[in-house]
């Protein structure tokens, strides 16, 4: 029998994407509840040719629900996910609330789907940048263990939600009209600008986004010894993050070997046309399922061909958030 679903945070950017992907993939369900904060309660949502009314999410919202897709923020996940589990639902949570909990699986279906079965009611969706990096990195790590990983991210406004995307559009128009840009969603001007990721700073000088990538990758790969360092940056792109990834392998690895491995890797698409200088761009990845990979080249600073450079692009809202969660839900049924 098809499961009863609930979407928590249905009016946000990822919540809307949940619905689009459920429809796109013809996900089977018997019923669906549209849940959000009290501010959104009563709004009407069209889904699969039917109108639904958004309900305020409470701890009583999950009776009869089998699978709950959460993208309502970390504090609300901590408040309501346990109530959903108590009511008998399995929660797939898109926030950071449970990712590093040792009792909660942290899952990318292309990497560690076997962890889904270990859930105790909650399965965590990794951070968007972690997903976008690790879908292509995992098949390489399986073939030749990675000793060190250096990542620089170029993150779109979409990572900060719908308000940030709206702000990028509004600021662009303001600046083109000769006006001062209005900053609300971000602390700095995002239009025509680049700045360090707006996540809180940690005592070690890294921000939370950077440490999420470090800690989550080690957990997902079940490889606590892997050396990882990250620099995360915001850029004035609407949606789809890019990442520069440098990998040091245990044994020699050539660009041709990388291309061969990635050409058949699930969730990966290659755009690696050196002759025409054509490599992945955010516009390639926007609203697409795969992570696009290119600029595959030897790191000539490392001896014995043990280093490889990659450039990747992935849709932060899609595979970096909603699609990954729906893929987990598909494996639950």
Image: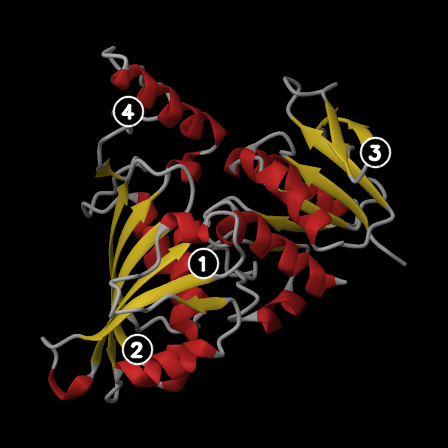
From the top left corner, tell me how far across and down residue 281 is, in percent.
Answer: 35, 53
| 158 to the left or right of 3 | left
Mark with earlier residue (4, 2):
2
- Residue indicated by mark 1: 131
Is 137 drawn above or below residue 58 in the view shown? below
- Residue indicated by mark 2: 146
Q: Disc 2 to disc 1, how far (Cα)?
A: 17 Å
Q: Disc 4 to disc 1, how far (Cα)?
A: 26 Å
Report the number of numbered marks: 4
Mark with earlier residue (3, 1):
3
Mark with earlier residue (4, 3):
3
Please name whichever residue, 3 or 256, is drawn nearer the observer in this view of the structure. 256
| 2 to the left or right of 214 | right
Specify the quadrant that holds the C terminus.
bottom right
Q: Disc 3 to disc 1, how far (Cα)?
A: 32 Å
| Residue furthest front in the image | 276
Q: Disc 4 to disc 3, how far (Cα)?
A: 39 Å
Corner quadrant of residue 20: top right
From the top left corner, tell me how far across and down residue 45 is, in percent.
Answer: 73, 28
Residue at the spot x=68%, y=42% of the render? 19
From the top left corner, tell me how far across and down residue 39 is, in percent.
Answer: 63, 17
Please name whichever residue, 301 or 199, is drawn nearer the observer in this view of the structure. 301
Specify the quadrant that holds the N terminus.
bottom right
């Amino acid at each position: 029998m098809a499961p009863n679903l609930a979407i928590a945070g249905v009016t946000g950017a990822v919540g809307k994407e949940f619905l689009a992907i459920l429809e796109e993939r013809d996900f089977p369900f018997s019923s669906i509840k549209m849940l959000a904060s009290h501010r959104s309660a009563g709004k009407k949502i069209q889904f699969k040719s039917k109108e639904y009314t958004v309900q305020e999410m409470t701890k009583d919202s999950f009776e009869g629900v089998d699978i709950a897709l959460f993208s309502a923020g970390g504090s609300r996940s901590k408040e309501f996910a346990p109530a959903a589990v108590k009511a008998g639902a399995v929660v797939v949570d898109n926030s950071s609330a449970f990712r590093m909990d040792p009792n909660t699986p942290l899952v990318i279906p292309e990497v560690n789907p076997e962890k889904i079965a270990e859930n105790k009611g909650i399965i965590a969706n990794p951070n968007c940048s972690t997903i976008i990096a690790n879908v292509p990195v995992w098949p390489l790590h399986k073939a030749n263990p990675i000793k060190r990983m250096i990542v620089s991210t170029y993150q779109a406004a979409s990572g900060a939600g719908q308000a940030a995307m709206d702000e990028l559009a509004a600021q662009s128009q303001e600046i083109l009209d000769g006006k001062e840009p209005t900053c609300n969603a971000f602390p700095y001007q995002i239009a025509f600008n680049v700045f360090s990721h707006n996540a809180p700073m940690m005592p070690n000088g890294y921000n939370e986004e950077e440490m999420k990538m470090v800690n989550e990758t080690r957990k997902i790969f079940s490889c606590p010894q892997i050396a990882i360092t990250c620099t995360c940056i915001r850029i004035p792109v609407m949606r789809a993050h890019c990442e520069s990834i440098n990998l040091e392998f245990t044994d020699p690895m050539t660009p041709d070997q990388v291309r061969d491995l990635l050409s058949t890797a699930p969730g990966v698409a290659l755009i690696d046309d050196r002759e025409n200088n054509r490599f992945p761009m955010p516009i390639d990845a926007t609203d697409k399922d795969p992570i696009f990979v290119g600029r595959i080249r030897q790191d000539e600073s490392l001896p014995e061909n043990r280093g490889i450079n990659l450039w990747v692009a992935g849709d932060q809202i899609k595979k970096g958030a909603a699609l990954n969660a729906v893929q987990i839900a598909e494996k639950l049924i």
